[in-house]
Image (tube, rainbow, N blue to C red):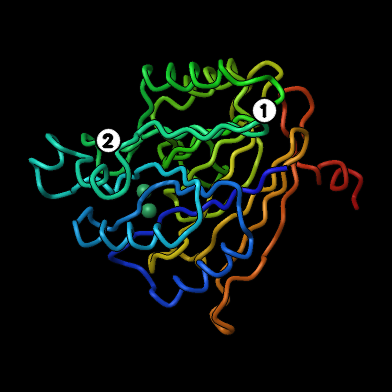
Amino acid sequence: MRTLVHLSDLHFGRVDHGLLAPLRTLIERIDPDVLVVSGDLTQRAKPEQFEEARAYLDTLPGPQIIVPGNHDISLYNVFRRFVKPLERYKRYITDDLDPVYIDDEIAVVGVNTARSFTIKDGKVSRDQLEVVRQQLAKVPAEVTRIVVAHHPFDLPDHFEERDLVNRAPRAMQAFSECGVDILMGGHMHASHAGSTAARYQLSEYAALVVQAGTATSTRGRGEVNSFNVLRVDSQMVEIDRYGWDVVHGHFELVDTDKFLRTGNVWTPHNDGLMAAGL
Ligand SMILES: [Fe+2]
Ligand SMILES: [Fe+2]
């Protein structure tokens, strides 16, 4: 079994500083095999915000798989936005825009979905899908395959279709062909774990989509600050969601979702119980 801590939307520049130390302490206690950060490390892609993000990441355990979000591209500076969109991200956070972690149980592949030509939308290109395919082609069949991107590939029904990453259906087709098990994302500042089966009718394939809320930003959009812990086995994944308890000043376990694999289809474990009225 592997344990992943999943942070997202840190938004340095609009951070609730009181959360940083308790978050670090809890992550240290969880002692993950991999720490995932699914984008929006800063609020406005300013050097001091990246510096602060970098300093905080340096205090967290590794290995770390980090991808940029739309807020990590300068919004107002046209030169920075269009000519050098991720220069600061690359300088302060990582110059690897296709980060990969592979061991004998999990393969974690990061994809950059942040783009200059849209304000907040994300996109995944044909070339990026090919890179994912090539990375995962090297991996033995029994290894659980995880893709990390800032923008979501699937969301619950009450979100809009345009909240999804552009070209999501094409990406899902590619992911089905290389057996991607788990899609980890952020951007919505809303937690969610579910199967992609309802939105994408792909033959004998349904991935598990895991969205993290904002771990540290003051822009919670109605949800408390939160993050996820994934326990990944080849046939079973459990996702713990930790939420910030304002009264007691710590992150506490809010709920746990469990998913089981049948072939290449991931399904919520509670389905049978709910159908039986239990
Ligand atoms: Fe965000
Ligand atoms: Fe975002």
Front one among 137 and 205: 137
Q: Is 266 placed left or right of 129 in the picture?
A: right
**Which residue is depicted at the point 76% across and 39% down?**
236
Q: Amino acid at mark 2?
A: Arg
Picture quarter containing residue 143? top right
Q: Nearer the viewer, residue 272 or 138?
A: 138
Q: Quadrant of residue 200?
A: top right
Q: Say which of 145 and 56 sits in front.
A: 56
Q: Which mark is residue 115?
A: 2
Q: Is residue 179 left or right of residue 61?
A: right
Question: For this view, does 211 lie left or right of residue 166?
Answer: right
Query: Are there few (<14), some (14-19), or many (20+) residues within 10 Å of tag 2?
Result: many
User: SS class of the residue under badge 2?
Assistant: loop
Within 10 Å of the Cα at label 1, are there few (<14), some (14-19), or many (20+) other Cα atoms? Answer: some
Instruction: Confirm or reject: label 1 Cβ below 8 Å from ligand 2.
Output: no
Residue 209 quadrant: top right
Q: Which residue corresponds to mark 1?
A: 143
Marks 1 and 2 sit apart, C-alpha to C-alpha, by: 31 Å
